[in-house]
Amino acid sequence: VVDKKGLAPAASSKAGGFLALDWNDGSPVGPLARKSFELHQELAKTLNLPDTCYRRLTCQAIAVGAQGSREKGSQKKLQHIEWVDAGYLGDRVLGTEDSIAQVHPKVFTESLFSVAETAGTSIRVGTVEGVVVEDGKATGVKVDGEVVPADVVVISMGPWSAQAHEWGLSLPLVYGQKYHSVLMKPERVLSQAVFFQGLGDPEVYPRPDGDVYVTGFPDSPVLVEEQPGEVEVRADVCDRLVKAVRQVSSEMETAEVRLTQSCHLPVTRDDTNQQSHPCYFGHLAVELRLPLQLSFTMLGGADFLLDGQTHYESSTTLEFSDLG
């Protein structure tokens, strides 16, 4: 694995890690999303991940008014709402523990890589400058002026995949949509994710380690120029996230703001032809089964590049020749 900054410097460690079983049902990626949901649970057991890395939880959509009252005595606890107690207008269930789960992206990625290391995988920090092609086949990657030989090259650069065009490769454009997030620490561990409707529609994912991940207010998708691990964090967006969640919860009103961060999530155009071009799904399409027994050298980045076909369920069934 070759990465400019190291293991998981971007969304692989900074995203929310929210998993829904059936939210993509009826779409082309519906079966893939279901496979991914099941595989995360399987890998959590296989890797013996702690509860602080993977767990099931509930999810609620809650409509809130623009003027959530914070006056003493105004809070009203509802039986099925865990921690929202101000500005409440209505709600509906988005998922139960049967269909909703979460993973800590950084811990999960590090755990997967640790297992891969036992099978001979290594990571090299460096800048990929191009793919070496001989007789129409990729035979290596040029890293910081040195050619590293490879049997298969997997381009897995997420929102930075557009850089592959500079190497003379014809791939669909991948854009990055910047999301800011804050980690807050209330006095108790919460277990209900909330998608708000109102106050800018922030999303809140409590984690089992006590942190509460708050995100929202995404930028428009762009071709990313910021470097991995060096993405600007705008204080005004983070302040807006904190203000919104404190406005609707007495528990979050005094919660410590532990970390502010941002990352780019990879997106493609809706009209990308998935039958003739590879698409980039990031960790939505990372489907590794254990034990990892790979007989070839694989060079790539932080995420895997697949073509969106749901029959690509594992590293053992993936036909790399189909990737071109």
Image (tube, rainbow, N blue to C red):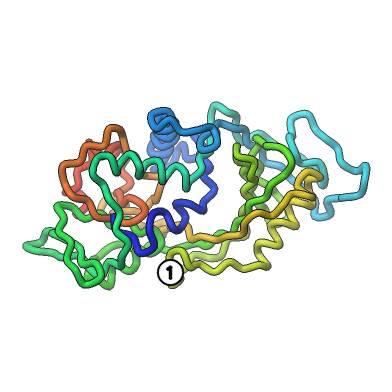
Write the residue at 46% across / 64% down.
229
Residue with the most extreme left position: 135
Closer to us: 146 or 157: 146
Write the residue at 18% across / 50% down.
297
Q: Secondary structure at mark 1?
A: loop
Where, by quadrant of the figure, is residue 47 drawn?
Answer: top left
Percent coordinates x, y for residue 246 in the rendering: 77, 51
Give the side of residue 315 with respect to residue 200, left or right. left
In the image, residue 266 sits, relative to residue 312, either above or below, namely below
Give the side of residue 54 with respect to residue 147, left or right. right
- Local crowd size for mark 1, using a 10 Å CA cut-off: few (<14), some (14–19), many (≥20): few
In the image, residue 270 sits, relative to residue 101, either above or below, namely below
Where, by quadrant of the figure, is residue 225 drawn?
Answer: bottom left
**Badge 1 is on which residue?**
227
Percent coordinates x, y for residue 205 in the rendering: 61, 44
Percent coordinates x, y for residue 168 in the rendering: 22, 70
| Quadrant location, the C terminus | bottom left
Q: Amino acid at mark 1?
A: Gln
| Quadrant location, the N terminus | bottom left
Write the residue at 27% across / 32% down.
291
Percent coordinates x, y for residue 38 in the rendering: 42, 31
In the image, residue 170 sits, relative to residue 91, either above or below, namely below
Residue 130 in view: yes
Residue 138 in view: no
